[in-house]
Image (tube, grey):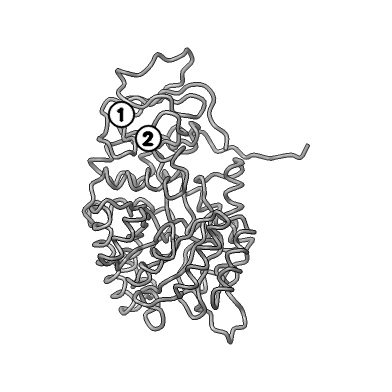
Amino acid sequence: MKTSQGTTLIANAQLIDGTGRPPVPNAALVIHDGHISYAGPAADAPPLPPHTEKIDARGGSILPGLVEAHFHATYFNIAALEDLDIKYPVEYVSLLSSVNTRLALECGYTAARSGGCLFNVDVWLKKAIEEDLIAGPRLVASGREICSAGGLMDWNPDFRRIGMEGLVFIINGVEDARKAVRALVKDGVEWVKTYPTGDAASPDINDHHTLCMTFEEMHAVVATAHNHKLKVTGHCRATQGIKNALRAGYDAIEHGTFIDNEGLDLLLQRNVPCVPALYFEKASIVYGPEFGLSQRVIDGHQETLDAGAESARRILRAGGRLGMGGDYGFGWNPHGDYAKELTFFVKDVGLTPLEVITCATKTGAEIMGRDAELGTLEKGKLADVLIVDGDVIADIALLEDRTKFIAVMQGGIVKTGQIAKPFPTVVKREK
């Protein structure tokens, strides 16, 4: 991805650097050749060279670009299980996913970690974004997911005589687990996504207290993935599933819904981050009836929401790490609503705006494995910046309204926002 050339000054705003430190009033951010050269009080900013470009932040907020830590690029208006895999061909899924990546960037998300993707599309999305062919967040890819036979993602009945190969590897035992990971190695993914437990969406067979993988299968996934320097995460709601994942060596936990004291101790000992993805549960409860979700399913989501909120609070208050994001792309939880998760964590879960922003920037970059260059506004890091017309500490919901974004920058280049120029169409010609 290209970076800006020359020097840019962003001033006349508070600076929220993403580290968790208090905002700096009347701050300045200086960008040189796409990287941050100064972030702090305007009065202490270094002398600027001639022809410095200046951006007036209008008394608002300067913060790092947001990180969506559980991004499903290929999910698009999902209303039924069939929509996850067999509704559209890969060609159309690819086009839809490019629409989602552009929307994510427009919503202030300059980076994202995939939480699973149809047909390995996210590996190629990442390449297209990095080569400036399409607009989108910097991606960490995970490709197709892994679940045991009869588990949450093995919903497609055998009488149809079609599998779920576009979305998930269905495994039976440790040899299948190793085989699936090796296929993902060849695909070029960075994270391996698994399904150790069920979900409220499947109350009859694989509810949120059901295990969907054995410990031996999970350990085989981890051993094989780590051998190839890949990381492993998993959809973990049931208490024992969380602990199995942590003992197996998982590098992150998705949801962590029903964590107990023993699980929390394991999480903290290994400093494993968790991405709760709670707004999906809230949206399922509020909007689910419009999409035909049964009361039984909605009641399960309510139980998951209540327990997940308590688990998230416990993890953060105990010194653990939370990432923000998850499961957007359903009809009742569409792409573009990403920042509603941030508002929910402030207004319903009880975190402070500064805590939530830190989770959505610094911790998100850590989960991606790119915290050395992303996630905070500190000297030497890439200038992935979000400039908001307003005080996001006073009103976190401003991040839901992309019309309030003065600029969304990647590597110092304004990609979208009020002051952006149209995104260029790039045609690469072979020499």
Q: Which image quarter: residue 261?
A: bottom left
| Disc 1: CA contacts within 10 A as few (<14), some (14-19) or many (>=20) | many
Q: What is the C-alpha distance between the residues marked 2 and 1? A: 9 Å
Extreme-bottom residue of the structure? 159
- Type of residue at label 1? Ala
- Type of residue at label 2? Ile
| Near-viewer residue (134 or 127) | 127
Residue 8 location in percent, x, y? 45, 23
Residue 157 location in percent, x, y? 54, 83
Q: Which residue is drawn at 31% across and 51% down?
A: 342
| Near-viewer residue (177 or 41) | 177
Marked residue nearer the N-terminal end (2 or 1): 1
In the picture of the structure, the residue carrying the numbered disc 1 is: 13
In the rendered image, the vertical position of residue 367 relative to residue 326, given as above or below: above
In the rendered image, the vertical position of residue 240 relative to residue 58, given as above or below: below
In the picture of the structure, the residue carrying the numbered disc 2 is: 387
Residue 316 location in percent, x, y? 27, 53
Residue 170 location in percent, x, y? 55, 74
